[in-house]
Image (cartoon, rainbow, N blue to C red):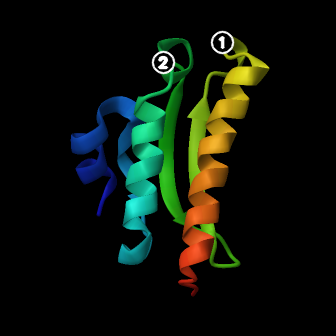
Amino acid sequence: MTGLELNALYGAMISPDAHVAVPDEWLPAVHTAMQEFVDLPTEIRSFVIVLGISRDAEGDLRIEVGAAREYLTNAGMQQVWAICDRALAATSAIGVRN
């Protein structure tokens, strides 16, 4: 799945040119995370965009998020990080590695 394909599903929450490279087994967790981003309150969602979804050097899920931090509260950023943490936990439970 590409950034453009995810953009078609989740609108402006993910950049159309986002680098997306994860195992197919992780896609359910990725879709859940993307829907959670879409479902964020407007005052958070308006200032956040997913720039990439890939694996880090250790083979774990990495969601790269861009945010206009000056417009977000600490609680708002915590909600963004919580989405990323849940997705990481879900993909770690699947066990697909490099």
Relative image position of residue 21 (x, y in whole percent):
43, 68
Q: Which residue is mark 2?
A: 46
Picture disc at residue 21: none
N-terminal of the pair, mark 2 or mark 1, is: 2
Q: Residue furthest right?
A: 74
Which of the 4 image quarters holds residue 34?
top left
Q: Position of residue 78 (x, y in %)?
A: 73, 32
Which quarter of the rendered picture does the N terminus lie within?
bottom left
Q: Which residue occupies 57% across, 87% down?
A: 98
- Marks 1 and 2: in contact by CB < 8 Å? yes
Q: Residue at x 78, y 22 (%)?
A: 74
Q: Looking at the picture, tell me which residue is in the foreground, 18 or 84.
A: 84
- Residue 19: x and y, percent? 43, 58
Vertical arrangement, residue 31 with respect to residue 46, above or below: below
Residue carrying label 1: 71
Vertical position of residue 29 compared to residue 58: above or below: above
1 in relation to 96, above or below:
above
Three-letter code for the amino acid on which mark 1 is drawn: Tyr
